[in-house]
Image (cartoon, grey):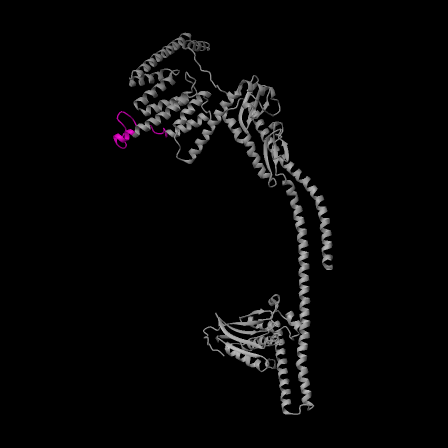
Amino acid sequence: MLPALAVLGPAMVLAFLGLRSYKAEQVLDESRFKRSIESIADLMASGLEESALAAIRELVDMARAGIPSAVDVKRVRSRHSLVGQVFILDRYGRLLYPALSKRQPIVRRKIALSIIASAEAATARPGANLFQEVAIYHRRVKRELEARRLLSKADLAEVQGQRSQAFGAYRAVAKRSARLAPGAYLGMARVAVAQGRWQDAAYAQSVLVQRYGIRLDWAGVPYALLGRIGLFTVAKRCRAGAGKGGGQSGAGKAPAGKRLCPKGLGEPQRLALRLYSDLVNDRLHTELRTRIYFIDWIRKQIHPPATSELRRRLSELDAGVVLLRVGIRFAVELGRTGSEAILRQAGYRPRALRSDAFRQGRALVVVQSLGSMVVGFVLRREQVSRNLRKQQRRKQLPEGYTVQLHRLPLPRDLRPAPSHVRPLGEVLGDLGLAIFGSQHQDRGLLASGMAQYLGLVVALVFVLVAGLLTMYRGVRQEMELARLKSEFVSNVSHELKTPLTSIRMFGEMLQQGLAADQKKRSKYYGIIVAESERLGRLINNVLDFSRMERGTKTYDFEAYSTGDLAREAVETFGNFREAEQFELRLEILEEPEVRVDRDAVVQSLINLLTNAVKYSGDSRRILVRVYGRSDNGVLEVIDQGIGIPDKEQRRIFEDFYRATNVQHGGAEGTGLGLALVRRHCLNMGGSIEMESTLDRGSAFRMVLPVTEGAQSRGSDK
């Protein structure tokens, strides 16, 4: 106990002092943990603020150079994912971008005014001949009037179905008047399509696109748009007509009165997709409402593309149309009230606003004033949350913690309550970052180190206790072994002394002639011989045990009959003086052959018989039984002696061990007999079995493996 206290006492004192120092360290860890959480939140907030500032600054720089185009705005939005709908207001609250109307002035001058102006310009040139210039302009006016009469004649012929005359009149108008040429080429294309003259129709539309693409018709639609729509229609109808004609007239032949589709016109779907792309990206500079109308029309003509690349391109264009419609809805929704509210609150520094007049205050707009205009964009809150999640993965918050975007101030009934709140600043308005964790997450994280420390202390104490127990057990075993060895030495000394005393006593009696007659001398000689044999058996047991301990014991294995081995052991033991007063019976049921060491088996049986004689008590009957069991031969010794207590039966085969009832009974012994029997049996591949009942006797069975191919012989004796 004192060694245990000497070890455990200082260990517990050290553990207590370490625990106190760890509590002080825990307080510092808590403050460090909170600071780390706050620093992570600051980094995330700074990243979002910088993204919003970079976006509004780029838009401001772009607005200083003029009203941006849709392509420019799309480029900005691709670089800054936080940017939603972009808008620009003038000082009066009017929406400059996106504009609901984008009308270009249509030049509608009267012919007379045009001629007069041209004449005045011509006569103003130095050296001009007035009469020649007047004659030239007179011929021009005459040609213009003639072209208008031809145009009217062509329109009338087209209406009346005289398509050949109409086509010729339109061509004449195109040659005579540059002003009326776009309308004439449109007429030529209509007549050619009606007649199935695809080459002429494609030529007329191509001239319209290339020569007069930037000019507008009476409705403000660019001729380039009309010409490209015409080319798509020609390609579509001529392909359809060629397919039908080919089925009727045979392969490689066109229908009667019609020509083949012109080469280089392209597939209708590719033409439609290209026109759709130009309309979405506003490359034709069309008024917004007209643009939306033709976008809807051309989109209906496009079939699902066959290749993945075309499908991806079409999906991108569809997304652009959605953004275009969003811009229109934004302009309508913002209205006059929302514009005025933004103008009142905008300043020369970027800031975020919420206006009840716009989306009922749900949208957050980032604006900055330039003096003559206000530039801003709608903040994409879902993209802010997405960027926040990406930053959260990069910053690696502790496990169990999440960062969420919330509008400030937070509701009082918000559950669970955040552990830290960080406002995002003026550029992102009333938004803030809230860091959430479980109620005891921070304490759990900080207490994990303490748990590890306590675990180490407990493990140390456990190891010390286990070491002490192991040491105590080892010392106890060594003490028990020392006691057994001491008893063994004492018992062996006594066992040696007893036969030696008898031998010496009877030898001296014979030497002194105290045995007068031959009968006494024979008796004394017999006692000396018996004691010598007893002494030899004891010495053999000690020597065998010593060889086994050193590992030098050898066995001579041969095949023997179990009956012969039992007979030899019984006959040998019957000659001993100890067996004189006992009824020794041999019962052989079977005689299986076993491959064993004969001397070891006989010695083991003699040891069992010796124990049976020693501990038989009042009973004088001993039975030796031989039989076979499965693949084993069994040699069994049964007595009716004092038996062995149940609690000591598992230790009876240990070295030097003797049962307590045997020790108290005064029977002599060394504690090696059964230990040698067990070792002999195990070394020969067998085993030893025991059944014992206190005060009723014991049965010991030597189970030895049978030799392969051995035959059993049964006999009773």
> Most extreme residue toward the bottom, as rendered?
517
x, y percentage for residue 334? 53, 21
The vertical placement of 216 against 459, above or below, is above
> Most extreme residue toward the top, as rendered?
131
x, y percentage for residue 562? 51, 76
The vertical placement of 644 against 405, above or below, is below
Is residue 569 within the magenta segment? no
Q: Nearer the viewer, residue 710 or 22?
A: 710
Query: In this orientation, does residue 21 appear?
Result: yes
All told, the count of numbered labels is: 0
**Is 677 situated left or right of 511 in this image?**
left
x, y percentage for residue 449? 66, 46
> Most extreme residue toward the front, as rendered?
618
Q: Nearer the viewer, residue 287 or 389?
A: 389
Quarter of the image where one finds residue 142: top left
Tell me what residue is drawn at x 55 percent, y 30 percent.
Answer: 381
The vertical placement of 394 against 190, above or below, is below
Q: Nearer the viewer, residue 709 or 624?
A: 624
x, y percentage for residue 225? 41, 22
**Is 478 situated left or right of 375 in this image?**
right
- The magenta span reads 244-267
The vertical placement of 625 against 454, above or below, is below
Is residue 256 within the magenta segment? yes
